[in-house]
Image: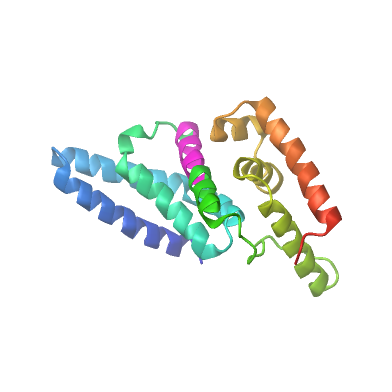
Amino acid sequence: MSPSSVYRDVAAEVADVVAAMAGEAATEGREVEAESRLLALFDAHQARLYRLARRMSRDADSARDLVQETYLRAARSVAAVPTGPAAEAAWLVRVLVNLCRDQWRREGRGRDKSVLDRPVSPSHPEAAAIARITIWRALQRLTPRRRAAVVMYELEGIGMREIASLLGVSTVTVRWHLSRGRRELAEAVRCGVRL
């Protein structure tokens, strides 16, 4: 699904929440300000959140749901979202990672039916599919925070300091998660993740 269709889906839901909040708002000015802030947050951070959600969830629909719920949480407490691009991104990423962690707990880590969207191009299409599924399943065995650190660093190319800021941890903790995550991924691949 294209980012513009994700935008329409989530923007419609956010607009509904904002409209519901509008009835409770003390002034029309605050209502317009809240809606403008939410739309600005969406425009600024939606693409990155969707990429992260896509790599942390089992399919595109689940990723859209995670992004939508992240923005609904922001809509319910606009005043809690810090200002400034880095602070906003950190707040939204933490909400998304926490939502993902909660979802994984509810599902009992039974997340076996998806593949990475990232293209893999060995000479044989079957080998590419097997590699993609193997890596995806190995990633799914990581804890949510460790998986988020690995995905952001290895797949998104985000630096350790920024990951630390986004996850609300120290850079030492990010390094630890990356080190442990790489070892766990290597072990899962070496032992042969069940296809």
Magenta stretch encompasses residue 132: no
Q: Position of residue 14 (x, y in %)?
A: 32, 53
Give left or right: position of 124 versus 142: right
Q: Is residue 62 above or below residue 28?
A: below
Q: Nearer the viewer, residue 172 or 195?
A: 195
Q: Is residue 135 above or below residue 174?
A: below
Taking the spot 37% from the left edge, 45% from the top edge, the residue there is 73
Q: Position of residue 149 (x, y in %)?
A: 65, 40
Taking the spot 44% from the left edge, 64% from the top edge, the residue there is 5
The overriding secondary structure of the stretch rendered in magenta is: helix
Q: Nearer the viewer, residue 79 or 43?
A: 79
Taking the spot 17% from the left edge, 39% from the top edge, the residue there is 29
Which residues are drawn in magenta? 86-96
Is the image coloured rainbow, by chain, by secondary structure, or in one colour? rainbow
Taking the spot 20% from the left edge, 38% from the top edge, the residue there is 30
Q: Quadrant of residue 78?
A: top left
Q: Nearer the viewer, residue 105 or 120?
A: 105
